[in-house]
Image (spheres, rainbow, N blue to C red):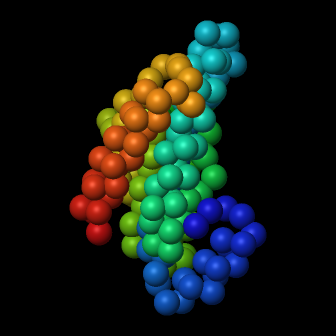
Amino acid sequence: MQWNNKDLEQYIDEKVIEYVDTLLIPLMPISLKNDKNLIKRAFQAELLSIFGNELERQFKGRMFLMPIYHYLSTADKQLEVTRLNEWVEDALTNPFKHVLFLTLDSDWKKVEAQLQGEVLWFPSMQSGDLQSDETKGMVKDQISQLTDLIKTYW
């Protein structure tokens, strides 16, 4: 389920039955300081969005995909941990049993123990063509691995 009218209406109807028990929060750093990094970050944001949407599609009815949580790449991670935990506290007023953070930023693994959820980090290409067969193959392989990993949390 995604952050849109149709899915939210369905979620509200079904949350009483507790089918949707997993919250997926994508994490994406941003910065406008370096032109070279702008292109890299834009590519990674597109990639993160593809991963989030595909995971939600595979686990539709069990997983709720939140909008991407953006933060400055230079931000203090401790402050971001506090903010993210506030998001989670708010979300846990609903019957979510599992919270997963999806990211390309390996720094989140360093603070994972402080988060109220599990960090799903995967290395990413720095740039490329999202429509190329090579990129599609890489995405498919990583989605398969993430799918298997998510199942271990249930």
Q: In this view, does 132 lie to the left or right of 119?
A: right
Q: Which residue lies furthest to the bottom in this view?
A: 17
Q: Residue furthest left?
A: 152
Q: Identify the residue at image location x=46%, y=81%.
A: 19
Please name whichever residue, 65 or 125, is drawn nearer the observer in this view of the structure: 125
Q: In which quarter of the image is the N terminus?
A: bottom right
Where is residue 26 shown, x and y percent of the image?
52, 47
Vertical placement of residue 64 versus 68, above or below: below
Q: Identify the residue at image location x=46%, y=72%.
A: 62
Q: Which residue lies furthest to the front in this view?
A: 133
Where is residue 16 shown, x and y percent of the image?
54, 89
Q: In which quarter of the image is residue 8?
A: bottom right
* Residue 121 visible to the viewer: no
Q: Is residue 130 left or right of residue 108?
A: right
Where is residue 30 shown, x and y percent of the image?
62, 28
Q: In which quarter of the image is the C terminus?
A: bottom left
Please name whichever residue, 154 or 96, is drawn nearer the observer in this view of the structure: 154
Where is residue 81 shown, x and y percent of the image?
47, 45
Please name whichever residue, 57 or 49, is drawn nearer the observer in this view of the structure: 57
Q: Identify the residue at image location x=70%, y=78%.
A: 9
* Residue 154 visible to the viewer: yes
Vertical placement of residue 57 versus 5, above or below: above
